[in-house]
Image: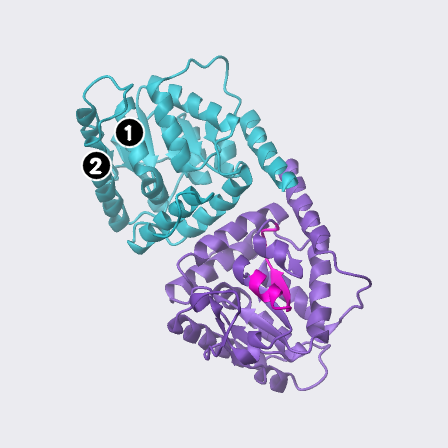
Chain colours: A purple, B cyan
Amino acid sequence: MADLPESHPRRSSLLARQKIVDGTKKGLLADSSMIAHGRGEAFDYLLGERTTDSAAMAIRHVATLLISAERPVISANGNTVVLAGESLIRVAAVVGCPIEVNLYYRTPERVFGLLSLLQEQRDSVAEEKGPSEFKGDWGKAVRSVRLLGDEADFRIEGLEGPRSLCTEDGIGLGDLILVPLEDGDRCEALISLGKQVCVIDLNPLSRTARTASVTIVDEVSRASISLLSEVLNPTKIEGEWDNDAALRDSLKHMSNSIDRL
Amino acid sequence: MADLPESHPRRSSLLARQKIVDGTKKGLLADSSMIAHGRGEAFDYLLGERTTDSAAMAIRHVATLLISAERPVISANGNTVVLAGESLIRVAAVVGCPIEVNLYYRTPERVFGLLSLLQEQRDSVAEEKGPSEFKGDWGKAVRSVRLLGDEADFRIEGLEGPRSLCTEDGIGLGDLILVPLEDGDRCEALISLGKQVCVIDLNPLSRTARTASVTIVDEVSRASISLLSEVLNPTKIEGEWDNDAALRDSLKHMSNSIDRL
């Protein structure tokens, strides 16, 4: 990837792919993570690899929910940490919420590896100057982001096996959960527990996308960067959120993209 | 995958995914093969995971080209061998053509590993009863399929580095090459050498799909099974092949699928 020119039209996509390949080699990701990433790449290709207006609206809505929730929590799997860990730490610092490593294919080794990577990312983000809109001590805010997930002391009702495990202090008692790249079963289970579940999913037809309270149909690292801007400058949202309308808009966008080419 | 029920609507897709995961673990596939497979999964999902009419027409056309070519050759990369090796050995046995292992990210280890797997597949196919339409000694026909690729004694003009290497007796002197899952650069280079290039590519917008003489927009294992039927029962094709029309038809199919859901 060293020879990838700055001007390459698909540079972001190719860099993201390399992060996933590297994360897999380090044992941080499950077997099928690269396949999931490839599926996402195809949908993003159809989206034109950019944030659509309806995705931007969804991001704005998620930002206001994160800020107004009582116990918001960001749940991160391997691909999320590798692709968007630093951005989500910045978001968590602004919102003041924890990040929980929560894996569908849970192994202690991967939870440990991802928590270590998040700690490194947190150290690095804490050294930044911080966004100009942020009032307060950036380094302190970042360092106080709690990284959860090593203690699985809670079970998500309605699920079986390792995929039901989570942290009481995080997802367990959380009222609003931002789960980029979530599985359909778990999204349904969390919703039926009465939680608000916000997801980032490039496939608007997936069960996750159709089940979530708010679905951001966008690439996770791009969406996380926008989400930071929005939590720093929250916009008042009028009226109810119509998730189906947003999904239909994304589908229309992909469909038009196919027709155009 | 042991607990995947026979009736699961996405069974073929999930079994194919497992083959790619297993092939990667065995070191047979390049780093990014799983990502490429995932991209294909997304497009196949939009196709409804079935062979469209225009893909069936393309397969029929490729069958007649394979049969009438002077020096046809089937070029196979890692994903192709893992997903469709046995089907393509059957096709090669009927057509009487060689199969060349030819890799974009060429390493001697992977060429050796894939040739060994093809040899195992050939042994297994030779033991089959053979298709009822086949006239002759099936076992003998299968065992005489030559497996090329370990001797890279030819360079494809217009390409640089390991990706330019091939076998003189295969792709080098071939007049018609069936290359499932080919790269865009190599497809263009082969076409500019005056060869007919037939590809199987799930992305109708890819450079490969748009450059090839005939593009089968279909999943490689499904297409290879249909291709066997067609080389056993070739249909006379009337008129010129309009590849752009076939690509447009596939796109329309994907686009309608998006609108429908």
The image shows residue B255, relative to residue A61, as above or below, that is above
Q: Amino acid at mark 2?
A: Ser
Packing grade of label 1 (10 A; few <14, some 14-19, many >=20) is: many
**Mark 1 vs mark 2, CA separation in Å:** 11 Å
Specify whether residue A130 is in view: no
Specify whether residue B102 is in view: yes
The question of residue A196 being in magenta is answered with yes
Q: Position of residue B109 (x, y in %)?
A: 25, 50
Q: Position of residue B159 (x, y in %)?
A: 39, 40
Tag 2 residue: B124
Farthest residue to the right: give it. Answer: A238
The question of residue B155 being in magenta is answered with no
Numbered circle sitting on residue A254: none
The image shows residue B173, relative to residue A221, as above or below, that is above
Q: Secondary structure at mark 2?
A: helix
Q: Amino acid at mark 1?
A: Arg
The C terminus of chain B: image quadrant: top right
B219 or B78, nearer to the observer: B219
A26 or A72, nearer to the observer: A72
Q: Secondary structure at mark 1?
A: helix
Tag 1 residue: B90
Q: Position of residue A91 (x, y in %)?
A: 64, 73
Relative to B204, A261 lies left or right: right
Q: Residue at 61% of width from left, 85% of height from top?
A: A139
Q: Residue at 52% of width from left, 42% of height from top?
A: B45
Q: Position of residue A83 (x, y in %)?
A: 52, 64
Label 1 or label 2, whichever comes before in sequence order: 1
Q: Residue at 43% of width from left, 68% of height from top?
A: A162
Q: Which stretch is magenta?
A: A187-204
Q: Residue at 43% of width from left, 43% of height from top?
A: B7
